[in-house]
Image: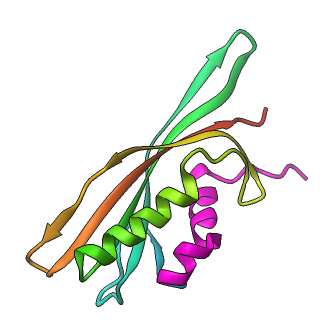
Amino acid sequence: MNRQQPTVRQAAFAHAAEHPGIQALVGDRIYHINLPQNPVYPAVTVRLISDVGERDLSGLARSRARVEFSCWDKSPKGAEKLALEVQAAFQDYTGLMAGVLQVLDCDIVSYESLYDAEIDVYQVPADVQIRYRVEG
């Protein structure tokens, strides 16, 4: 049976969910792409921005993905605190992510503070660049 490698989004989602600092703040309130209706805050949404292969002389050997972690809370301090935990979980990470994805390097490449007056909530999206090995 050929076991398929999980997507980088799945591995990053699992890595965030397993991180003690993130877990302490949001529990299981980590969602793919969108918040649910009537969410409880704080919460995190995860979406894949891009995933581009890099070639070397032997062919496609690694990939560079950008995954956005949006940190949501009713206060700016709460959203910022959660974003700092995302940074702690991913910045300079190497090794097996979520036990399945061989990560070569991680960096926070974009980080900003936003406010949505319509729903009265603060958002800090943190974009994480993840370089990882692609299984042949």
| Scheme of colours in the image | rainbow
Judge left or right: residue 60 versus residue 41: right
Is 128 or 85 nearer to us in this picture?
85
Q: Quadrant of residue 59?
A: top right
Query: In the image, is residue 94 part of the stretch drawn in magenta?
Result: no
Judge left or right: residue 97 versus residue 28: right
The picture places residue 81, in percent across and down from the top left corner, at 38, 71
The picture places residue 133, in percent across and down from the top left corner, at 71, 35
Quadrant that contains the C terminus: top right
Query: In the image, is residue 5 part of the stretch drawn in magenta?
Result: yes
Which residue sits furthest left? Answer: 117
Which residue sits furthest right? Answer: 1
Is 92 or 27 nearer to us in this picture?
92
Q: Up-down: is 126 above or below 81?
A: above
Judged by its main secondary structure, the magenta piece is helix
The picture places residue 21, in percent across and down from the top left corner, at 55, 74
For the point 40% across and 64% down, the residue is 83
The picture places residue 44, in percent across and down from the top left corner, at 42, 72
Q: Up-down: is 128 above or below 83?
A: above
How many numbered dots are placed on residues in this image? 0
Q: Which residues are magenta?
A: 1-26
Is 79 or 134 nearer to us in this picture?
79
